[in-house]
Amino acid sequence: MVRENVKWIVACLGVLISVVLVPLLLLVGPLNQPNNAADHLGAVLVFVGSLATAAVSFISIMVKGESDQRLTRDMTTRKPDCG
């Protein structure tokens, strides 16, 4: 179970890093237009804002998954009431 979670986390981090680095390198590298710095700054700020939103969404999905696993585990290990 733990090994499966580690593999899943490593895969998610790999995808997350590639999704973050490729557009950022494109914004700073080949798509950088030195003539219009205000537009470039705006594009970088929008990119950072969307990354923050995606990070919050990702964290909430991870927390929900963990709580669902815990609830399932608690329900299967709970003894029935004899009342």
Image (cartoon, rainbow, N blue to C red):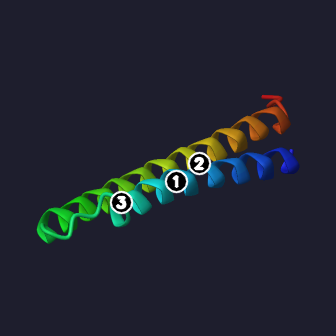
Identify the residue position indicated by label 1 in the image: 59
Reply above or below: 67 against 72. below
Tag 3, which secondary structure? loop
2 or 3: mark nearer the eye: 3
Identify the residue position indicated by label 3 in the image: 30
Q: In the picture provided, is 36 more to the left or to the right than 7? A: left
Q: CA distance from mark 1 to mark 3?
A: 31 Å
Measured as percent of width and height from the top left, residue 47 is found at 31, 57
The answer to whether the residue labelled 1 contacts the one labelled 2, judged by CB atoms less than 8 Å apart, is yes
Q: In the picture provided, is 37 more to the left or to the right than 9? A: left
In terms of depth relative to the viewer, which is nearer, 65 or 67?
65
The answer to whether the residue labelled 1 contacts the one labelled 3, judged by CB atoms less than 8 Å apart, is no
Q: In the rendering, which numbered label is found on residue 62?
A: 2
Type of amino acid under label 2 = Met
Q: In the rendering, which numbered label is found on residue 22?
A: none
Residue located 46% across and 55% down the image: 55
Type of amino acid under label 1 = Ile
> How many numbered callouts?
3
Q: CA distance from mark 2 to mark 3?
A: 34 Å
Check disc 2: other Cα within 10 Å, few if <14, some if 14-19, many if 20+: few
Type of amino acid under label 3 = Pro
1 or 3: mark nearer the eye: 3
Residue located 75% across and 34% down the image: 75
Measured as percent of width and height from the top left, residue 51 is found at 39, 56
